[in-house]
Image (cartoon, helix red, strand yellow):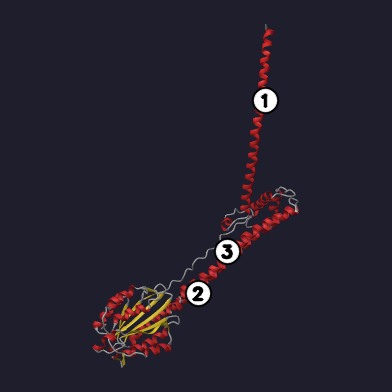
Amino acid sequence: MLHLNKMYLYPFFIFLLFLSGCNDEVIPATQNSVGSVKVEDTKQDDSNNRENEDKKLQETIFPNGLEEILESTKGTYAGQSYEDNREAIVKELEAFKSLGEEPSEEELHRYYYKLLLMFSEEYERPLENEPFNPIEPPTIYDGKFQLKPNLNVEIVLDTSGSMIEKVDGQSKMELAKNSIEDFAQMLPNEANVGLRVYGHEGTTAFEDKVESCESSELLYEIQPYDKSKLEAALEEFQPAGWTPLAKALQDAKDDLKTFNGEENTNIIFLVSDGIGTCDGDPVKEAKELQESNIDPIVNIIGFNVDEEGEQQLRDIANASDGSFAYVHDKESLNDQFNRLKDISDKWIQWKGAALGHNSEESSERLMEITEAREEWQETNFRERDNIKFALNHLNESGKINDQTLHKLNTINSERFLIPFNLGQDLFSDLFNESQNLTVEEYKEIFGKYEENS
């Protein structure tokens, strides 16, 4: 019976072996297929990783722009020379592996990168040009006003009929003319002066009022002092008619409108011997004058004026945020004009000091830029030379051949030129900017006379 069982079981075992054989053929084939895909993917990933790494190496070796140069990691021997550290450097170089006969570009980059870890330099951020710290202009009238770069003075003179009256043997008109001549000669050469007269046409007769009240003329236009021209202008008028005080103030504002108060010290001396006798509101005009862009310093001089006239002139001075002075003779009139001499002296002293300060700061800034440029160049050359010395040692010790030495030196030269060329442009721009700032500061001090004249 046992024998029969074996006979029946034998075909079953044969069938199992057949199935097993089929499985042996199918499963390994499937595993080999999957395994080959993984190997190919791994190779592709490795290739991509190497490309990305080499790209990063190139970006490190060849920085693109100032910020990348400044952010570079400094090497172990940054700021030091090869010679001063020869023993320690040679010891590190001995640990370098030898490169083959024909290393790939990637291998060259990796090798050079190892040298950068030793010798990469740290560059200082270049200076930025900043405006000078100017010397503040002095103040005048007890700190009420501050002087500006340009000085313009306009004299507004009453030439009405009453100016013929005599004081100490001379007419008020003669005294005023003499004071104006003396005053103008005291002005700095760079200052401008102007002369406007009002009430110089017609007569004091009622029938001439309209003509006289329209008379207001700038006989000496605002410009630097010219003795002969001013003398000629002073000869053109004599005491004549009415007193168009409001119109004179309005016209004075127009005379100075191109001289804005931000860059100009505009001073008005208005001389009158009485109240305004024409239409218009001189106090209102004085207020508008004060609120205008010329920001004037108004000096009202009452020449031997009566009580009513003095009150109106004081009101004009208050409305213009100016000053009033009563004068009764030549000496007191001259004293008022001489107040400008103190202003002129302060103005000249400030300009001299400001110019010296400007020149000094300009020289200091140029020196700083020069020193920064020299330091930049020294850093640039030190890195190149240290790596060059290291490459020569590696060549002499047999770690790289002559051809590889040439290729690595080429990489070194290409890297050297990046901060070198950038530094050339950078410091050239800084020098030019510094010069331009010096010119601008000079203009701030001395103003633009040609544009204003």
Q: Does 267 appear above or below 174?
A: above
Q: Which residue is mark 3?
A: 426
Q: Which secondary structure lies at badge 2?
A: helix
Vertically, is 24 above or below 323?
A: above
Residue 210 at x, y percent in the picture: 27, 85
Dot 1 crowding, Cα within 10 Å, few <14, some 14–19, many 20+? few
- Which mark's residue is nearer the viewer, 3 or 1? 1
Gap in Å between the C-alphas at discs 3 and 2?
Answer: 28 Å
Mark 1 belongs to which amino acid?
A: Asp
Report the quarter where the N terminus lies. top right
Tell me which amino acid carries mark 3.
Leu
Residues under labels 3 and 1: Cα distance?
A: 74 Å
Label annotation for residue 9: none
Which one is earlier in the sequence, the residue at label 3 or at label 2? 2
| Name of the residue lying farthest toward the top | 1
The foreground one among 238 and 35 is 35
Give whichever of discs 3 and 1 has the lower sequence position.
1
Residue drawn at x 59%, y 54% as measured from the top left:
72
**Residue 231: image location, x then y, percent:** 40, 89
Amino acid identity at mark 2? Gly
| Residue at horizontal 66 percent and vertical 29 percent from the top | 28
Q: Nearer the viewer, mark 1 or mark 2?
A: 1
Q: Position of residue 246 (x, y in %)?
A: 29, 80
Q: Nearer the viewer, mark 3 or mark 2?
A: 3
Query: Which of the numbered marks, if any, corresponds to residue 24?
Result: 1
Of callouts 1 and 2, the N-terminal one: 1
Q: For residue 220, which quarter of the picture?
A: bottom left
For the point 62% across and 56% down, the residue is 121
Disc on res. 356: 2
